[in-house]
């Protein structure tokens, strides 16, 4: 019902100064996370919901929206053209959500499979790094092999920054056996001209996360074109800014009563942290969806594997504010993880794009069908639990999240 998730405008206007009061004028001060949540419908000035695919034809082959492209203009809905295929299927849709075609990347390998943890795509095709074959497979948008490229330093994500400079990255962990095993970093810049790595995003990763600590989401800002990243569960919450020339730390976030306390961690066998700690302690587990507009940085956080907040901080003064999001069960688990954030659209539109599986969104749609009609971009008449995923376009109000 509309009263259940859309607050009155007068109440919202009263709440804004409370949630967005500055915590301090000094850099490094803790960010206060409010307990009260605001409806996602009140946080956004526009929401658009797009149904993908054809229920009668595609629900069996469709697994994750990260595998889906919009073929029009060859723009990929993934982390700045990066995504994480789980079975090698690449499925194409147009901007209206209609299924176009698909292919299986494993068909390019004559013997065996492509063991990929991510891919990059642009108008020239798809680049799939395979650490087992130590090769980057360059395919066209129909799955035909174009070329082979060598992998640098056993990286498993590939992102061209310029014609000469490539940003390579690691997803989940940096493999052993490298010359710089003593360093822990998510990504590095490599020059084809010099044949050398000239910049690294070095992290102060705790010992218990040095085997598997990372989860890459490289977001290209629509405001300045730079890339931003923060390591998962890094107790420093270090935010990196990347250009073709350098990788540099621009801030470290600190949260009042929500930071990891290393002396309270519970360890399992093999020095692995019991994941229940993050939920029980209700600490910030991830910082993602990072953007920068002039001297202010904006991001979304996951707290305790159960809630999301929008964060706004001034990099000069340290002034900060936060607001908790009420999703109304329209997304899985009623909160978002970084891999559910798919993309930002063009500069002039400034939408954040996420997705919700049909098995989650169907019940929300059934309960609020009439209210949701203005937000639907295409036909949901026969929408079912066996349908494909739904894309949700969010344009946050300027006072909350100036994306």
Image (spheres, rainbow, N blue to C red):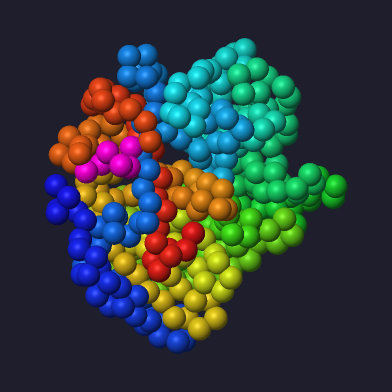
Q: Is residue 349 above or below residue 72?
A: below
Residue nearest the observer in this picture, 227 or 172: 227
Total count of labels = 0
Q: Position of residue 69 (x, y in %)?
A: 52, 31
User: Which secondary structure is most common in the magenta stretch?
Assistant: helix
Residue 54 appears left or right of 36:
right
Q: Is residue 345 above or below residue 97?
A: below
Residue nearest the observer in this picture, 354 or 27: 354
Q: Position of residue 304 (x, y in %)?
A: 27, 58
Residue 380 appears left or right of 69:
left
Residue 240 appears left or right of 55:
right
Q: Position of residue 4 (x, y in %)?
A: 14, 53
- Numbered range of the magenta stretch: 371-376
Query: Is 372 covered by the magenta stretch?
Result: yes
* Residue at x-position 24% and y-position 75%: 14
* Residue at x-position 50% and y-position 19%: 100
* Residue at x-position 85% and y-position 50%: 194
Q: Position of residue 106 (x, y in %)?
A: 55, 18
Residue ranking furthest to the right: 193
* Residue at x-position 33% and y-position 60%: 43
Residue 387 visible, this orientation: yes
Residue ranking furthest to the bottom: 25
Q: Is residue 312 above or below residue 182?
A: below
Q: Quadrant of residue 356?
A: top left
């Amino acid at each position: 019902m509309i009263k259940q998730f859309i607050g009155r405008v007068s109440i919202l206007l009263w709440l804004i100064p409370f949630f967005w009061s500055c915590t301090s004028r000094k850099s490094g001060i803790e960010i206060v996370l409010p307990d009260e949540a605001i409806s996602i419908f009140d946080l956004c000035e526009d929401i658009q919901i797009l149904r993908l695919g054809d229920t009668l034809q595609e629900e069996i082959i469709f697994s994750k929206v990260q595998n889906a492209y919009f073929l029009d203009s060859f723009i990929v809905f993934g982390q700045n053209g990066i995504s994480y295929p789980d079975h090698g299927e690449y499925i194409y849709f147009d901007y209206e959500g209609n299924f176009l075609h698909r292919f299986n990347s494993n068909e390019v390998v004559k013997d065996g499979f492509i063991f990929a943890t991510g891919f990059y795509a642009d108008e020239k095709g798809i680049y799939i790094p395979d650490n087992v074959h130590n090769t980057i497979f360059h395919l066209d948008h129909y799955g035909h092999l174009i070329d082979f490229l060598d992998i640098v330093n056993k990286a498993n994500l590939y992102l061209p920054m310029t014609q000469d400079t490539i940003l390579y990255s690691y997803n989940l962990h940096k493999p052993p056996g490298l010359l710089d095993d003593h360093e822990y970093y998510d990504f590095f810049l490599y020059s084809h001209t010099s044949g050398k790595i000239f910049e690294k995003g070095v992290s102060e990763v705790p010992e218990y996360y040095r085997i598997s600590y990372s989860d890459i989401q490289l977001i290209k800002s629509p405001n300045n074109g730079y890339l931003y990243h923060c390591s998962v569960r890094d107790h420093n919450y270090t935010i990196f800014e990347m250009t073709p020339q350098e990788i540099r730390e621009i801030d470290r976030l600190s949260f009042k009563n929500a930071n990891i306390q290393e002396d309270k961690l519970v360890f399992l066998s093999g020095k692995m942290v019991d994941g229940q700690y993050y939920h029980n302690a209700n600490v910030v587990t991830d910082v993602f969806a990072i953007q920068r507009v002039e001297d202010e940085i904006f991001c979304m956080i996951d707290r305790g594997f159960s809630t999301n907040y929008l964060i706004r901080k001034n990099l000069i003064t340290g002034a900060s504010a936060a607001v908790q999001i009420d999703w109304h069960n329209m997304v899985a688990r009623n909160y978002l993880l970084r891999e559910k954030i798919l993309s930002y659209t063009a500069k002039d539109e400034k939408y954040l794009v996420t997705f919700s599986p049909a098995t989650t969104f169907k019940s929300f749609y059934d309960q609020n069908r009439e209210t949701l009609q203005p937000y639907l971009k295409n036909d949901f008449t026969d929408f079912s639990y066996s349908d494909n995923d739904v894309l949700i376009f969010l344009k946050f109000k300027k006072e909350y999240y100036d994306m």
